[in-house]
Image (cartoon, rainbow, N blue to C red):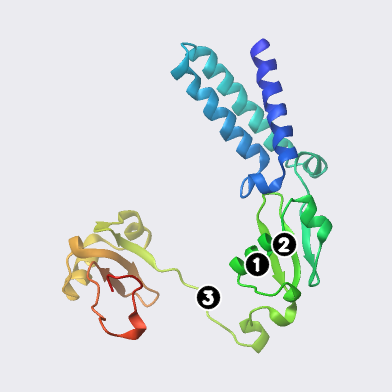
């Protein structure tokens, strides 16, 4: 019982400390996830320092169980708002929310840098910017500043096709060949038609029209062409 009690206290204390620290400190990860990784790492490393591998493993098992319990509890909407922080509005209809910035401890210059990373240079063009519970910032521009969509122009576009890798780093991806109901003989014939060898292929993908695209290890020489300028002294 002492092991369970001590592990539970450490888990709760760590969670509260991370909540007080704020979403910015745990950006891209939920508080539970960060705490779980941090505590579990320390528990597992304990046998390296002291000779108590059994007790360390017991703590680790209890930590995993606690993590699973809290994650399951977070699936319930009523408990979710208690366990996780709510999203914080940083910009609304082009106006920067000072209270929101103060709550997440973010200066204006940092907010502007996040907007630039998202591709926006003016806060007045933003309909809403929110720091999510994971610490990531979501930005939605005003309607007149968002990218034009095909639907806006009544243009019907075909379904997006994802090229399927068949050779990667000179190695045949057999499970993709099986998925496409093709065999190695077909692949080798296509490679030979293009005068290539598998050992010299960096990437070969199966295209929508049933052909093979090959990118080998060779890089075309565009020396002197300003459209292919390579920064640095090795250009």
Q: Are marks 3 and 2 in contact (CB under 8 Å)?
A: no
Tell me the distance, in whole angstroms, between the alpha carbons under discs 3 and 1.
31 Å
For residue 217, side relative to residue 79 (left or right)? left
Tell me the distance, in whole angstroms, between the alpha carbons under discs 2 and 1.
11 Å
Mark 1 neighbour density, 10 Å: few (under 14) some (14–19) many (20 or more) = some
Query: Which numbered marker is on residue 108?
Result: 2
Q: Residue furthest front?
A: 233
The quarter of the picture where the C terminus appears is bottom left
Query: Which numbered marker is on residue 159?
Result: 3
Q: Residue shown at 21%/69% (left/top)?
A: 191
Q: Residue shown at 17%/66% (left/top)?
A: 197
Q: Are marks 3 and 1 in contact (CB under 8 Å)?
A: no
Query: Which numbered marker is on residue 115?
Result: 1
Tell me the distance, in whole angstroms, between the alpha carbons under discs 3 and 2.
41 Å
The quarter of the picture where the N terminus appears is top right
Percent from the top left, x then y, of residue 187?
24, 66
């Amino acid at each position: 019982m002492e092991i369970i009690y001590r592990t539970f206290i450490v888990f709760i204390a760590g969670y509260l400390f991370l909540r007080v620290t704020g979403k910015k400190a745990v950006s891209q990860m939920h508080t539970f996830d960060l705490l779980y990784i941090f505590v579990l790492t320390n528990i597992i490393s304990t046998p390296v320092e002291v000779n108590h591998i059994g007790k360390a493993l017991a703590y680790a098992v209890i930590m995993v169980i606690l993590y699973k319990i809290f994650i399951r509890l977070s699936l319930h909407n009523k408990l979710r708002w208690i366990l996780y922080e709510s999203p914080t509005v940083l910009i609304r209809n082009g106006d920067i929310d000072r209270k929101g910035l103060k709550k997440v401890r973010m200066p204006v210059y940092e907010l502007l840098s996040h907007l630039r990373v998202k591709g926006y240079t003016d806060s007045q063009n933003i309909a809403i910017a929110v720091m999510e519970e994971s610490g990531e910032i979501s930005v939605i521009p005003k309607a007149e500043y968002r990218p034009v969509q095909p639907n806006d122009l009544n243009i019907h576009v075909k379904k997006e096709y994802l090229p399927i890798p068949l050779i990667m780093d000179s190695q045949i991806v057999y499970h993709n060949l099986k998925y496409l109901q093709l065999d190695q003989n077909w692949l080798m014939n296509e490679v030979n038609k293009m005068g290539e060898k598998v050992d010299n292929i960096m990437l070969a993908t199966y295209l929508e029209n049933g052909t093979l695209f090959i990118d080998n290890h060779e890089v075309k020489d565009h020396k002197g062409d300003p459209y292919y300028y390579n920064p640095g002294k090795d250009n």
